[in-house]
């Protein structure tokens, strides 16, 4: 079988690794990626960021940082313990989330690992804060050289074999390629999604009304964040601010981000970094945390990102074309789950293909290869969509806490959050057992359940 993956972000690269791990090496797998990665993040990347051709959520071109949740780290450990270790080594494993109010109140702390849902003797996974580039680079190293081909996929059509892609190379030459299975891991502005659903607005990403800025500050890490290793989230009446190291503390780099409400979609051509920095200073000038004040006074704004989300899609593909990662379900960044869900997608799809193609047990399946691929794509959606929907719904509730509110609502928010931190029973009544839902999910168990159900109804 010939497989093409469109996109070499977290979703595309991890899908490649999972397919290589679980499917026969006789299959051919090619990755097409439109952007060469920026070599390294420096503290003076503001200019290049603004000159990029589109404000995108793409891992390859957007700097800044992210956090891989324990569920995402577990997928990496299952995939390859060495890759897991490399991601941990370049990042900052977080033990505590610290929640603060702009007025200086500490609203509470919660554990960032998945220890609460693990049985005795089971390895706890931590949440790992990382620069996007650091995470991407660690995964790319595992993929190896010459796997990613730098071509932009311009369009996709169905063909007798499966799918045909039109490509543009870096010199502007057109090429064509064909696959039995085409995997769209091409992010929130996916061309593969357009091929499946057309240009209709309801299938296009929507701007949430929230935008963010962020970057890295070269500075010694304050002991309040390293002991215990913490990620700080601060909420105010006019926005949100977060910070944590995104690399080992010895690197002396603090990663930060600030989210704010703006109905005006930031435009790459008109953005003025000086004005953005001035707005950042103004927005947080009365916030009481001295670490936050130090960051905004010294830091350069390195990335600006409007946040996009997708409404739930009716399917993630059929026959020989499938979507995963942000292309299928761009989640609100508030969930902190985009990368982890992309990792879970890639693991689930590869395990499903292995089972359905019968590579685990020849007697498992009937039908031709194309039918089996189609079945795997359908089961993939049945298994993954409810999980992602749950996370998306929680993200909507959380992101309302980042919009502009009056003083009364601001203090109500502080009290609400304080109560949530103080009383797990109160939190469970509102959100359910979030940790259990997030961290106890297992792709293999879900696949076995779905296949059993299918066998029962056959
Ligand atoms: C501000 C912000 C903060 C976030 N914070 C977190 C966080 O803390 N934790 C977390 O887990 N997630 C976070 N996320 C989400 C996370 O970054 C994404 O969910 C994750 O990177 C998705 O990866 P992906 O591979 O699906 O998409 P992308 O990273 O967008 O990768 C898609 C790739 O496809 C390529 N591509 C696109 N079109 C084409 C084409 N036509 N031809 C060829 N290649 C193409 C792109 O260049 C890109 O490399 C955040 C996102 C944002 C915007």
Image: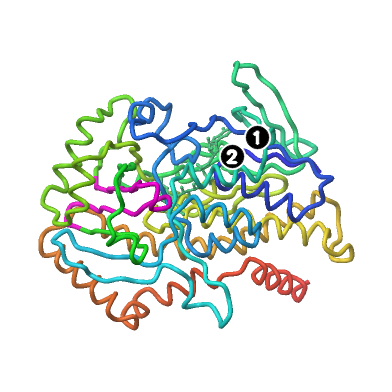
- Categorize mark 1 by other alpha carbons within 10 Å: few (<14), some (14-19), many (20+): many
In the picture of the structure, the residue carrying the numbered disc 1 is 148
Q: Which residue is mark 2?
A: 8
Secondary structure state at the residue bearing disc 1: strand
Q: Confirm or deny contact between disc 1 and disc 2 (CB under 8 A).
A: yes
Residues shaded magenta = 236-261
What label does residue 271 carry, if any?
Answer: none
Q: How is the image coloured?
A: rainbow
120 with respect to 176 (left or right): left
Q: Is residue 403 above or below residue 438?
A: above
- The reply to whether the magenta stretch includes residue 249 is yes
Q: Position of residue 203 (x, y in %)?
A: 49, 45
* Most common secondary structure along the magenta stretch: strand
Give the Cα distance between marks 1 and 2.
Answer: 7 Å
Q: Residue at x 61, y 44 (%)?
A: 12
Q: Residue at x 86, y 64 (%)?
A: 361
Residue 81 position, x and y percent, is 63, 59
Viewer-side residue, 49 vs 210: 49
- Left or right: 163, with 137 as reference point: right
Displayed quadrant of residue 51: top left
- The residue at the point 50 percent across, 77 percent down is 117
**Image quarter of the C terminus:** bottom right
Residue 340 point in image, percent of width and height = 51, 57
When asked about the image quadrant of residue 33, the answer is top right
**Label 2: which secondary element:** loop
Question: Can you tell me whether the CB of the residue at mark 2 lies under 8 Å from the nearest atom of ligand 1?
Answer: yes
Q: Residue at x 46, y 58 (%)?
A: 128
Q: Is residue 428 left or right of residue 413?
A: right
């Amino acid at each position: 079988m010939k497989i093409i993956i469109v996109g070499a972000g977290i979703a595309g690269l991890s899908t490649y690794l999972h397919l290589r791990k679980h499917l026969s090496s006789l299959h051919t797998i090619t990755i097409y990626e439109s952007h060469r990665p920026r070599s390294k993040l420096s503290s003076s990347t503001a200019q290049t960021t603004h000159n990029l051709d589109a404000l995108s959520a793409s891992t390859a071109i957007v700097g800044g940082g992210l956090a891989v949740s324990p569920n995402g780290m577990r997928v990496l450990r299952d995939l390859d313990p060495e890759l897991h270790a490399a991601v941990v080594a370049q990042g900052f494993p977080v033990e505590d989330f610290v929640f603060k109010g702009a007025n200086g109140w500490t609203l509470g702390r919660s554990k960032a690992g998945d220890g609460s849902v693990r049985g005795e003797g089971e390895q706890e996974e931590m949440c790992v804060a990382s620069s996007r580039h650091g995470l991407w680079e660690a995964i790319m190293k595992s993929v190896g050289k010459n796997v990613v081909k730098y071509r932009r996929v311009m369009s996709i059509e169905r063909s007798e074999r499966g799918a045909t892609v039109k490509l543009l190379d870096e010199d502007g030459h057109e090429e064509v390629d064909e696959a039995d299975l085409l995997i769209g891991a091409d992010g929130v502005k996916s061309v593969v999604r357009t091929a499946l659903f057309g240009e209709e607005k309801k299938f296009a990403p929507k701007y949430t009304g929230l935008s963010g800025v962020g970057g890295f500050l070269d500075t010694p890490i304050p002991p309040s964040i390293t002991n215990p290793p913490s990620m700080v989230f601060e909420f105010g009446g006019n926005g949100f601010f977060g910070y944590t190291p995104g690399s080992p503390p010895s690197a002396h780099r603090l990663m930060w981000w600030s989210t704010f409400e703006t109905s005006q979609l930031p435009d790459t051509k008109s953005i003025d970094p000086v004005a953005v920095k001035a707005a950042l200073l103004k927005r947080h000038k009365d916030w009481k945390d001295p670490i936050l004040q130090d960051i905004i006074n010294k830091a350069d704004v390195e990335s600006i990102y409007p946040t996009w989300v997708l409404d739930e899609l009716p399917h993630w593909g059929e026959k020989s074309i499938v979507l995963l990662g942000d292309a299928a379900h761009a989640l609100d960044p508030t969930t902190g789950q985009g990368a982890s869900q992309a990792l879970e997608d890639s693991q689930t799809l590869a395990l499903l293909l292995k089972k359905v193609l019968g590579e685990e047990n020849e007697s498992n399946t009937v039908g031709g290869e194309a039918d089996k691929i189609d079945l795997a794509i359908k089961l993939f959606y049945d298994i993954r969509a409810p999980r992602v929907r749950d996370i998306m719904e929680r993200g909507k509730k959380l992101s309302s806490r980042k919009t502009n509110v009056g003083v009364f609502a601001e203090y109500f928010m502080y009290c609400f959050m304080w109560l949530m931190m103080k009383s797990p029973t109160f939190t469970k009544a509102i959100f359910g057992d979030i940790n259990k839902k997030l961290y106890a999910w297992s792709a293999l168990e879900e696949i076995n359940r779905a296949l059993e159900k299918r066998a029962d109804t056959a």
